[in-house]
Amino acid sequence: VLAGFVMSSVRLFRVRRTNYARLCGAVRNILINISSLVPLSDNNVEINQARINMLRWVILAYELSVLKGRGCIDNESGREYLENLNLLKRGEWDSLIDGDRHTTAWWWIQMQARELRRRGVILSDIDFHKICNAVTLCR
């Protein structure tokens, strides 16, 4: 019985570690995609702010994913942690869906990418789809 418990615990640890490593890699991928495909503008503060928000939302979604794994995604300590990291702006916490807050942040990123593509900031459908695919890998 003890051996079975130990084997089960080791297996669970490996699965969690593998999932965490995948999430870290996917987050690096989307950060690189956004920072290279959404250009900085010399004269458009709004575009620059959209880019900054997208990059911040990636880290927010990552941290929310980790908090979900720890069972802290919806509690006040999780919110305070994110506020201390300056990852939440006014009203964002209340806009995140309870129990699935990280998915809301991924959706924000994809919707912002769609708007930037519509405005011609993201230059091609291929670049837009790269960002969308990177979001999918993170979820």
Image (tube, grey):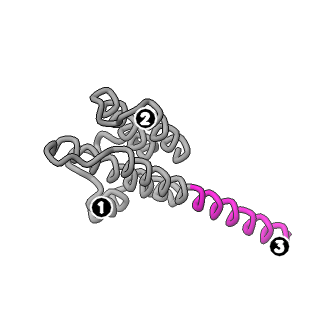
Residue 80, which numbered label? 1
Q: Residue at x 26, y 60 (%)?
A: 86
In front of the other: 109 or 29: 29
Mark 3 burial class by Cα count in 10 Å: few <14, some 14-19, many 20+: few
Q: Earlier in the sequence, mark 1 or mark 3?
A: 3
Give amino acid for label 3.
Leu
Q: CA distance from mark 2 to mark 3?
A: 51 Å
Kindly check if marks 1 and 2 are in contact, taking CB atoms under 8 A apart as contact.
no
Up-down relation of residue 118 to residue 107 (above or below): above
Disc 1 to disc 2, how far (Cα)?
33 Å
From the viewer's perspective, is residue 96 above or below residue 76? above
Q: Residue at label 2? A: 128
* Residue 60 in picture, x, y percent from top left: 37, 53
Question: Pointer 3: what residue?
Answer: 2
Which of these two is toward me, 117 or 76?
117
SS under mark 1:
helix
Residue 113 within the magenta-colored segment of the rendering: no
Q: Which residue type carries mark 2?
A: Phe
Mark 3: secondary structure: helix
- Is 67 left, or right, of 38 in this rendering? right
Residue 83, position as x, y percentages in the image: 27, 60
User: Over which residues does the magenta segment extend?
Assistant: 1-22
> Disc 1 marks which amino acid?
Glu
